[in-house]
Image (tube, rainbow, N blue to C red):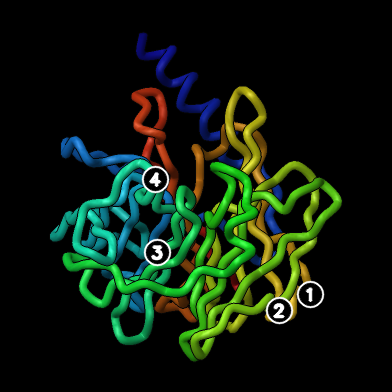
Amino acid sequence: MRRLLLLIALLAGCSQAFGQAMASGVTQVGRFIWLNDDPAFGGMSGIEISDDGSRFIALSDRSTLWEGSVTRKGGVITALTPELITPLHISDGSPTDHHTGDSEGLALGADGTVYISFEGLARVAAYPEVTGPAVRIPRMPAFDAMQPNAALEALAIDAEGAIYTLPERSGSAMQPYPVYRYKDGTWTTAFEISREGPFLPVGADIGPDGLFYLLERDFTGIGFRSRVRRFDMTGGGAETLLETRTGVHDNLEGISVWRDQGGAIRMTLIADDNFKFFQTTEVVEYRVAD
């Protein structure tokens, strides 16, 4: 049995080491499996990491928000300790339901306001206090035409407080993804992102370098592949930072981009376990040297 376990561990290590393509200067720096006995735990679809890497906010797709501290050793995550677990409410103070509660994208404003995008009733809502009611943000007419279960998966915010979101599906394999921006009370189409291959957008962030980072996922039938691309704020300058083979990571859906103490860009990615016992809430980090 010990030999079998050793072989499994070695094969897993080989998958981690050789099952992905990374751009020059990109290295994996940590992988943590987050476990928790709370019945609400699971389905993590978004994550935000503080500028110093010591705090986290995580979002479940069942409208529960988790906040707490990050323990690290040598810069690598060794524990995530929740200090606040709270269900989300709609603007009238009522709990979310099946129609209003498919929470997918997460972004954190400079003033501490939490923004969340939803996929059931496609919309973005603001939470000045996460334990209180949502503050409505007007819906864009284009949201009504989005495909069921393929709406606003990804959410990001820039240094000026403008919000960016995009749908999981663009409408056809040849059609680019529109990136919508909410600024000064108005929605516009900020830019478009090329659709490349079978990957679909599931998470986004704007890094401290001012670039737009897009996490994409592909389900191959036996597991998940992940890709991270980044763009300038016109949708140009596309660069693929990471592309994994099936099974290297679980169902990565959330991304937070920040700068570590060494001055490098750090990408923190979190997996949605779909509340399945055979999947994991995996948190993996990559460093981008440039």
3D distance between C-alphas at marks 3 and 4: 15 Å
3D distance between C-alphas at marks 4 and 2: 34 Å
Residue 113 seen in render: yes
The residue where tag 1 is placed is: 237
Task: Give the residue displayed 39% in from the left and 60% down from the top.
Answer: 47
The 10 Å Cα crowd at callout 3, few under 14, some 14 to 19, many 20 or more, is many
Question: Mark 3, mark 4: which one is toward the viewer?
Answer: 4
Image spot of residue 35 (x, y percent): 25, 39
Q: Amino acid at mark 1?
A: Gly
Q: Secondary structure at mark 1?
A: loop
The residue where tag 4 is placed is: 99
Q: Which mark is residue 232?
A: 2
Task: Give the residue displayed 24% in from the left and 54% down from the top.
Answer: 80
Q: Residue furthest top?
A: 1
Image spot of residue 29 (x, y percent): 47, 57
The residue where tag 3 is placed is: 116
Q: Amino acid at mark 4?
A: His
The 10 Å Cα crowd at callout 4, few under 14, some 14 to 19, many 20 or more, is few
Q: Of residues 27 and 221, which is closer to you in this image?
A: 221
> Can you say which quadrant of the picture contains the N terminus?
top left
Question: Mark 3, mark 2: which one is toward the viewer?
Answer: 3
Q: Amino acid at mark 3?
A: Ile
Mark with earlier residue (4, 1): 4
Asked if the residue under mark 2 is in contact with the one under mark 3, i.e. CB atoms within 8 Å, the reply is no
Corner quadrant of residue 275: top left
Mark with earlier residue (3, 4): 4
Mark with earlier residue (4, 2): 4
Mark with earlier residue (1, 3): 3
Task: Give the residue displayed 79% in from the left and 75% down from the top.
Answer: 236
Q: Of residues 151 and 71, which is closer to you in this image?
A: 151
Q: Secondary structure at mark 2?
A: loop
Task: Give the residue displayed 38% in from the left and 68% down from the top.
Answer: 125
